[in-house]
Image: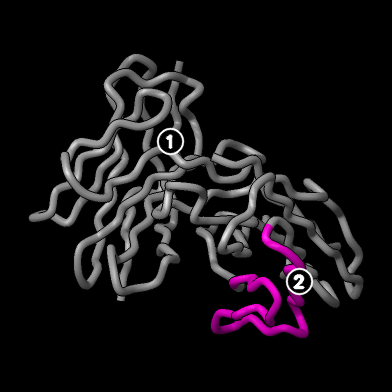
């Protein structure tokens, strides 16, 4: 499996501000995804980060609120814009396929965001 | 469409006893099934998966899961629980072919192992 890192690991932000979360993988991957995990909830897919083109957003998520970049096959960023307390969540980057493992998504350690 | 049900929000077990975390699924076609574990303040770690072949799948940390097609279940098991197994466990499913690579996750089951 690959090493997936996220920065920052946690942050406390004021409402109305924006935070950019980075996801770095130590090998090239075809697909990268961003998930949100609200307190006590399961994972919700925000978008698929596409290399060299605009991200594909799931229903209920829009580019203006969650702009995503993916400049290459090992890196992606998610920005949470104009934050409100409802954005307090864990944000998770995931990747796959990895090498010969074509079936499994692997996750980064997550970014724990608290909005005051 | 695909869905996963984890009927228990919380499972309590004494250390040394066997544990089971339940998962049932619904998918149009053959399923790929996954278990992930989330320790406090951590991301999701992959535990094991069923793709094809033997219905009993063995994974990390002594966990195993049994695929039961007739009952559409994929329960996670361990013969002897450890306090360190206390965590949040997620089951996930996706269709084997012709569908999205993206799985659907259950709502999670909190496993608490008491000393």
Dot 1 falls on a residue whose secondary structure is strand
Is A86 situated above or below B6? below
Q: Which mark is residue A69?
A: 2
Q: Is residue A38 left or right of residue B85?
A: right
The range drawn in magenta is A48-73
Circle 2 packing at 10 Å, graded few (<14), some (14-19), many (20+), is some
Say if the magenta span includes residue A54: yes
Work out whether B95 lies above or below A7: below
Q: Disc 1 marks which residue? A: B111
User: Between tags 1 and 2, which lies in front?
Assistant: 2
As helix, strand or loop, the secondary structure at mark 2 comes to strand
- Is B87 placed left or right of B72 in the picture? right
Seen in the image, is B112 located left or right of residue A15?
Answer: left
Q: Residue at x 82, y 50 (%)?
A: A8
The chain containing the residue under callout 1 comes to B
- How far from the left and from the top, in percent, is residue B74? 24, 47
Q: Please count the marks in the image.
A: 2
Label 1 vs label 2: CA separation? 36 Å
Query: x, y (%) of residue A22?
Result: 78, 57
Q: Quadrant of the C terminus of chain B?
A: top left
């Amino acid at each position: 499996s690959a090493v997936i890192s996220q920065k920052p690991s946690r942050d406390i932000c004021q409402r109305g501000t924006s935070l950019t979360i980075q996801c770095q993988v130590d090998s090239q991957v075809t697909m990268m995804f961003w998930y949100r995990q609200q307190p006590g909830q399961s994972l919700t897919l925000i978008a698929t980060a596409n290399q060299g083109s605009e991200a594909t957003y799931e229903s209920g998520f829009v580019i203006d609120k969650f702009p995503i970049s993916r400049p290459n096959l090992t890196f992606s960023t998610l920005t949470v814009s104009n934050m409100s307390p409802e954005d307090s969540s864990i944000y998770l980057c995931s990747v796959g396929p990895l090498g010969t493992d074509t079936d499994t998504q692997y996750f980064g350690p997550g970014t724990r965001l608290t909005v005051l | 469409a695909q869905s996963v049900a984890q009927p228990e929000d919380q499972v309590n077990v004494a250390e040394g006893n066997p544990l089971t975390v339940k998962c049932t699924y619904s998918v149009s076609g053959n399923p790929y099934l996954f278990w992930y574990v989330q320790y406090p303040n951590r991301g999701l770690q992959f535990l094991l998966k069923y793709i094809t072949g033997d219905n009993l799948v063995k994974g990390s940390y002594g966990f195993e899961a049994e695929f039961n097609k007739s009952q559409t279940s994929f329960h996670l098991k361990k013969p002897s629980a450890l306090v360190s197994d206390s965590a949040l466990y997620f089951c996930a499913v996706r269709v084997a072919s012709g569908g999205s690579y993206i799985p659907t996750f259950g709502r999670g089951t909190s496993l608490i192992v008491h000393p």
